[in-house]
Amino acid sequence: MKILSTVPLLCLLFGATHTLAQKKKPNVLIILADDVGTGDVPGYWNNEIVDMPNLRALQEKGVTFTDAHSTPLCAPSRYSLLSGNQPHRGTEVFGTWGLYPSGQTQFYGRQQSIASMLKTGDYHTSMFGKWHIGGGLPDGYNKTNILSSQDWENGRLSNGPADHGFDDSFYTLEGIQGAPYSFFRNGKLLTEEEDIVYWEKGEHVSQGGNTFEILNPGEGDKHWDSTSYNKKIYRKAETFIDNHIENHSDKPFFMYFSLGSVHIPHTPPKQYFDGTKIAGRYEDPHLDLLFEMDLIVGSLTKKLEDENLMEDTIVIFTSDNGGLHMKYPNRVLRGFKGNLYENGHRVPFIMRYDGVLPAGERRDEHYIALWDIYATIAQLTDLKIDEYSAQDSKSFKEYAISGSAGAPRKYLTVYKPQTDKHQAAIRDGDFKFIRDYINKWEALYNLKDDIGEKHNLLVTDFDKYNGLRKKLRNKLRQNGPCPADRGHSFKLRHGKKAGTTVNCSFFRKYSESKCYWQPFGEVVCNSICGRFRKFCRLWKDYEAEFLDN
Ligand SMILES: *[C@@H]1O[C@H](CO)[C@@H](O)[C@H](O)[C@H]1NC(C)=O
Ligand SMILES: *[C@@H]1O[C@H](CO)[C@@H](O)[C@H](O)[C@H]1NC(C)=O
Ligand SMILES: *[C@@H]1O[C@H](CO)[C@@H](O)[C@H](O)[C@H]1NC(C)=O
């Protein structure tokens, strides 16, 4: 409380003149951690193991959302954050992860990323770190010699950050977990041809003498060293800010900073820039990496403060999915990354925007999602969202500013569409309903008094909750990967037949190219276009099951 005491005074002094409307468009920094759950950071369940003064400072100067959600998986969450859509609106209902032979990303049709949206407001945009939502190689895909089979002299990566609204990008396609083990800048490979090597699975020693691990063999740079990943992307981010100040200060900037921490392999660096010991600081390298993550957050915020940019910058810290710590599981929440119990998809979420958001407050009342960032940033920057983009995004601006504002969204659905593990969950206030479509179980929890998801109300009180169960089954279906199409007709807006009145039968002869140029098909005829019949056909009995409920 002591730290917070000066802030209300400042608000009083400046409150009258310092309103949102008069502010120049703010910079936006989104820091996305990897596999960091609410049990891994301070401010949630009092079970923090690692000292994180920089995240605590961010909380003291901003707003901490305690009921924020992602998907339980990496790549689908990244698409959701950047697109403002639930994952199944993208190219693959299962998500697009690394490189694809077809060169696709998860962005489907005309969907615009949050960077593209911000560019309509003349933002200077950047991306650092882990991309992991697809892309294509210049000369076709060969997993064995993924890099050396390409002509990098003339070729570049397609469908990467540079093709989705980022002016400047420095990234790896799969973070630290998969090949190619090389950085790209704006689509250009940064590894010289003679430096391409094949990294075998197992432990290696880098040229700088650091021990690191390769989990999945494949080609990469002979200088690869995953221990230095986060420090490396931080340095590039710092350079971007310097360049922004000197050469682009007439514009606001957007930075998507996508950390390698704390995905496996857990090989922390020996020390931080200033010599602070990292590796071996804690009894487990996973914890060392959490410590390093906090230092990086500290460097980013300090850079903004030192350059007097913090006043005009929205900072968001969050994670792609819940925690993955087997040795130190979340003591309050059930589950892990990858499943639909709370610790699988509830993520840390801190937002700071000096002078607009209050300092040191918590938001416990309503849920928000990673795909809500898009609409929230659009509203805070006073920019319009393209009509075919960010369909699932709801702005939580008012809720962030004043906790007493209403709920940003009524229902929150989280899907994990996988052929062998298809699951879905939905929140309706304090209630959470989970369906497992393969093993055919259902559960309903009241999180208000059962945040650990221990008491399945459908077991103890089926008759009392059967009505709610039926309602939530239907809501899951309406929002999910295999919804019904709308019955009414509509006018086509694009293509040769623009202006013609059609109904969903127009799309029924499935053709990807037809859907691609008619984004309205995605909006009105969900089952046919964006939400792939390929997947829904796997679920024939799914349809019947829903209809009789
Ligand atoms: C991939 O490259 C390897 C090694 O050059 C070659 O043996 C293989 O036939 C290639 N595969 C394809 C699909 O081109
Ligand atoms: C500003 O732009 C010039 C010209 O491109 C470049 O040489 C310089 O390094 C830039 N400044 C910074 C701080 O990056
Ligand atoms: C949908 O369009 C087709 C072809 O234009 C037409 O035959 C059919 O009657 C329409 N269906 C409805 C429900 O309007």
Image (spheres, rainbow, N blue to C red):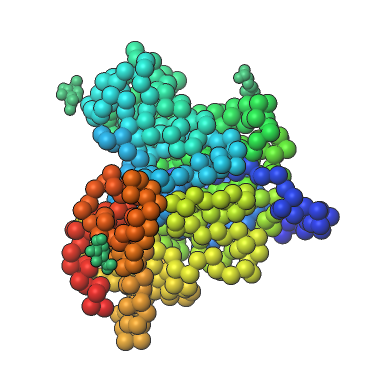
Q: Residue at x 33, y 72 (%)?
A: 474
Q: Which residue lies most toward the top here?
A: 194
In which quarter of the view is residue 463 placed? bottom left
Nearest the camera: 321 or 207?
Answer: 321
Q: Residue at x 18, y 64 (%)?
A: 540
Q: Position of residue 343 (x, y in %)?
A: 41, 59
Q: Position of residue 115 (x, y in %)?
A: 51, 41
Determine whether, in the image, residue 223 is placed left or right of residue 251. Answer: left
Relative to residue 232, is residue 430 depicted above or below? below
Q: Which residue lies most toward the right here?
A: 13
Point out the quarter of the image occupied by ligand 1.
Answer: top left
Relative to residue 95, is residue 180 depicted above or below? above
Nearest the camera: 259 or 282?
Answer: 259
Q: Position of residue 293 (x, y in %)?
A: 52, 41
Q: Residue at x 66, y 44 (%)?
A: 26
Q: Residue at x 62, y 49 (%)?
A: 381
Nearest the camera: 439 or 548?
Answer: 548
Determine whether, in the image, residue 202 is placed left or right of residue 350. Answer: left
Determine whether, in the image, residue 211 is placed left or right of residue 306. Answer: left
Relative to residue 522, is residue 543 depicted above or below? below
Nearest the camera: 300 or 502?
Answer: 502
* Rendered-image quadrant of the C terminus: bottom left
Determine whether, in the image, residue 403 is placed left or right of residue 293. Answer: right
